[in-house]
Amino acid sequence: TDTVGTAITEWNLTEATGSGQMATVRWNGTNSSGSPVDSGSYGVRVTATDKLGNTKNVTKTTETLTVDTDTPSVDIQSLEGVSRHNGRLFVNDSSAVTIEIDADDGRETPAPVEKLTLQVESTATNDRLTPAIQQDADNETQWTATIRSTDLPEPGPYQFTASAVDAANNTGSADTTIEYDTTAPQLSAVIPAVDTDTERAEVRVRSTESLAANPSVTVTNPDKSEQSVAL
């Protein structure tokens, strides 16, 4: 029954208990139509009727059945040690990534999840690893893991997936992709023309890949003096 005593689903146990036998009922959290019930607390009411039509209701009030069908909430809150460029995340071979995750059971009054795992999997190969993850002793919904880029088998994109399991065995997850890049950009520079009247020149710099910021350029003059050029 629900919290106001309305029957959610019923079983007729007349045959099973007709000779004074014990009967076992297993409920899978669905109503009489077979649809999952809402998360919440439910009671048990047993109604017995004898051959003369006398009826006795026994309501189990010392315990409640708790139905939890809510998906755990998992949120990757922060990533430290990564570079961001054009909406993509990067690490190089000297990086250490610290990932902070918030995870709860997703109910109206959130509780910590029973288990949280972090899996790092290459999206280009079959390489994967499962780093250790620590739960905050003061806030049990907060978890932290640190992964050194050198722990990753080879350069390329990796998907970081945090997966949570709550007390009712519901699962939830969140993921993000980080690219492990060990190749330094290759730069080339040319001065296509010099205006001798104005003593001005154009400097063109080309990179083999996108850069996080404009490169630093220094021009050496014929007299060996140097000057910085803003791009």
Image (cartoon, rainbow, N blue to C red):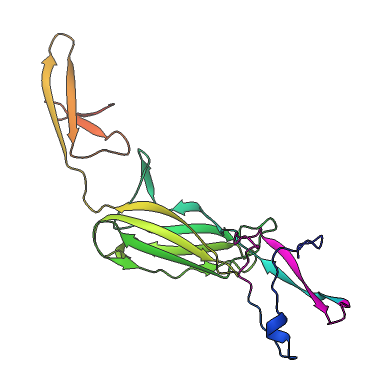
Task: Considering the whole magenta stretch, tell me its main secondary structure.
Answer: loop
Q: Position of residue 42 (x, y in %)?
A: 74, 66
Left or right: 67, with 101 as reference point: right
The residue lying toward the viewer, choosing from 116 and 133, is 116
The residue at the point 36 percent across, 56 percent down is 159
- Above or below, comparing residue 77 to residue 43 in the picture: above
Q: Position of residue 190 (x, y in %)?
A: 12, 28
Question: Which residue is at a point 18% across and 20% down the rendered structure image?
Answer: 202
Q: Dividing the picture into quarters, in which one does residue 119 lie?
A: bottom left
Q: Is residue 40 magenta?
A: yes
Residue range corresponding to the magenta coloring: 27-55
The number of numbered badges drawn on the structure is 0
Front residue of this view, candidates 185 and 26: 26
Q: Nearer the viewer, residue 41 or 171?
A: 41
- Against 217, residue 3 (above or below) is below
Left or right placement of residue 91 versus residue 102 in this view: left
| Residue at x 17%, y 18% (from the top left corner) | 201
The x, y position of residue 100, in whole percent, is 51, 58
